[in-house]
Image (spheres, grey):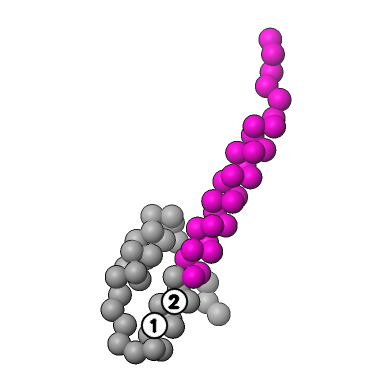
Amino acid sequence: MNKLELSNKQLEFLKFVIQDFEYNDNEEKNLIDQIESMIYELQEQDALRIIGALKAQAKRPTAEW
C-alpha cells in the first residue's frame, strides 16, 4: 500500500474530481467508491481531531489577574 499526503484543499479537490468521474465498468465504479470512502473517512477523522482540540481548549482554565 502506498501513502499520499495531501493538504485539505487538495483533498477537497480530489473529492470533487472523483465525484464527477464517469466510470466505464464495475471495476472502475468499485475503485471510485473505495477512494470516496477513504476521503470521507479522512475528513471525518480530521473533523473529530479538531473537535477534540476545541474541547480541550475549552477546558483549559483562564488566567485571572
Which residue type does callout 2 highlight? Asp
Q: Position of residue 62 (x, y in %)?
A: 68, 22
Within the image, what quadrant is residue 36 found in? bottom left
Query: Compared with residue 49, is residue 1 higher up or lower down, i.e. above or below?
Result: below
Tag 1 near tag 2, CB within 8 Å = yes
Q: Position of residue 28 (x, y in %)?
A: 38, 85
**For the magenta stretch, what is the residue range?**
37-65
Q: Image check: 30 left or right of 53? A: left
Q: Residues within 10 Å of mark 1 (few under 14, many from 20)?
A: some
Q: Main secondary structure of the magenta part?
A: helix
Query: Compared with residue 64, is residue 11 higher up or lower down, i.e. above or below?
Result: below
Within the image, what quadrant is residue 1 found in? bottom right
Q: Position of residue 5 (x, y in %)?
A: 48, 64
Is residue 49 within the magenta segment?
yes
Mark 1 falls on what kind of element? Answer: helix
Q: Measure the C-alpha gap from mark 1 to mark 2.
A: 6 Å
Q: Image check: 62 left or right of 48? A: right
Residue under circle 1? 29
Q: Quadrant of the C terminus?
A: top right
Which residue type does callout 1 highlight? Lys
Instruction: Say which residue appears at 50% left-offset and 58% top-offset.
Output: 43
Task: Please give the count of numbered marks on the rendered protein.
Answer: 2
Within the image, what quadrant is residue 45 found in? bottom right
Q: Residues within 10 Å of mark 2 (few under 14, many from 20)?
A: some
Instruction: Say which residue appears at 67% left-offset and 38% top-offset.
Output: 56
Instruction: Say which residue appears at 69% left-offset and 13% top-offset.
Output: 64
Question: Between residues 30 and 56, which one lies in front from this camera angle?
Answer: 30
Query: Compared with residue 62, is residue 51 higher up or lower down, i.e. above or below?
Result: below
Residue under circle 2? 33
